[in-house]
Image (tube, rainbow, N blue to C red):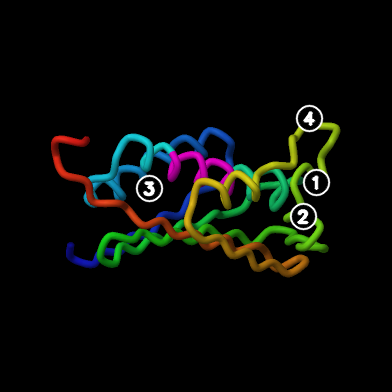
Amino acid sequence: MENNYMKLEFLSKSNNESFSRVVVAAFAAQLDPTLEEISDIKTAISEAVTNSIIHGYEYGEGMITIESTIKGNEIEIIISDEGKGIGDLDEAMEPFYTSKPNLERSGMGFTVMETFMDTLTVESRESKGTVVKMTKKIKSLPDEER
């Protein structure tokens, strides 16, 4: 598979979350993933973008950037914002932690991303923003098993 790259920027509006999932899924389709692999990628994208919208830009709007690179059979996805950042990243990465209990958030976003992707790293600085980096290897299956 030939290497490839794409970059997408959009306003942190909740209706752009589904748009971003579809764009990344369409980009990943060139790896001929299974439906389960595409679903995993879309779920992880949804969680990361929602995190930027709800937490990063909680009192206003800003830009969210998604960069995706394909190398061989692996897709790397980087989602970044320039929002308020995360004060205590270790605490935020804990399952069930939410800074927005009033919005009935489950606090499982990073856990979901970690579960559905092969790797997850998160970097954040207060008042500078957050960068979520995820990778997933697409397993090559014979056509008769797809």
* Residue 50 disc label: none
Mark 1 Cα-neighbour bin, 10 Å: few <14, some 14–19, many ≥20: some
Label located before the other in sequence (3 or 1): 3
Q: Which residue is mark 4?
A: 104
Q: Which residue: 74% across, 46% down? A: 95
> What's the CA distance linking mark 4 and mark 2?
16 Å
In percent of width and height, residue 122 lies at 63, 64
Q: Which residues are magenta?
A: 40-49
Q: Which residue is mark 3?
A: 24
Q: Which residue is mark 2?
A: 92
In percent of width and height, residue 129 lies at 67, 64
Question: Do the CB atoms of the residues marked 4 and 1 lie less than 8 Å apart?
Answer: no
Residue 41 shown in magenta: yes
Image quarter (top left, top right, bottom left or bottom right) of the N terminus: bottom left
* Residue 97 disc label: 1
Question: Do the CB atoms of the residues marked 2 and 1 lie less than 8 Å apart?
Answer: yes
Mark 4 Cα-neighbour bin, 10 Å: few <14, some 14–19, many ≥20: few
> What's the CA distance linking mark 3 and mark 4?
27 Å
Label located before the other in sequence (3 or 2): 3
